[in-house]
Image: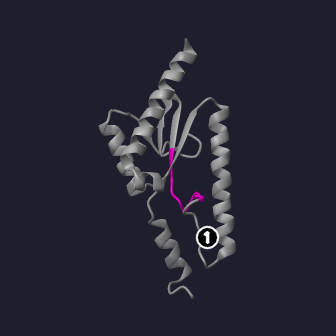
Amino acid sequence: MADKITSEQRSEIMRTIKAQSHLENTVAKELYRRGIRYRRNNKKLMGNPDISIQKYKVVIFIDSCFWHCCPIHGNIPKSNIEYWVRKLDRNAKRDIEVNKYYVDNGWYILRVWEHDLQNNFESTIERIIAFVKEAKISLISRKL
């Protein structure tokens, strides 16, 4: 099916898409409510992590099932297949590069799937909090 709008109109629509999702905002608010202090989308850090705590060398990425090729829910759109395969493959490769960078530099990295938050928000938040606490303890013990 042909697109009903021009490429200029499509570009304008794509420019209006926000970098932060509703789900990321909900997670951030809940972590803050529970006493976790962080930075959002820190452009100084590789990959602009959704949540970062530099003091404890923690980065958390909230990966959408579509953009990050979820093995359960990821799919390729039926139109313009070649473009989407290249685009989504590059996203997956970038995720691997970012993970390697943080691991090689002694950071604690956690990737959370969108569907984990949608299916069981409370337990996923608890998992994130436990991860941050574990990273904090581990970092402190490394310094001793």
Residue 98 is one of the magenta-drawn residues: no
The residue at the far left in this view is 33
Q: Residue furthest top?
A: 144
Q: Residue at x 33, y 32 (%)?
A: 35
Q: Nearer the viewer, residue 70 or 79?
A: 70
**Apparent side of residue 121 relative to residue 138 in the rendered image (left or right):** left
Taking the spot 62% from the left edge, 36% from the top edge, the residue there is 102
Q: Residues within 10 Å of mark 1 (few under 14, many from 20)?
A: some
Locate residue 81: give its quadrant.
bottom right
Q: Is residue 10 left or right of residue 79?
A: left
Of the 4 image quadrants, the one containing the N terminus is bottom right
Near-viewer residue (68 or 52):
68
Q: Amino acid at mark 1?
A: Ile
Image location (x, y in percent) of residue 65? 53, 59
Q: Which residues are magenta?
A: 61-71
Residue at 48% x, 34% y is 131
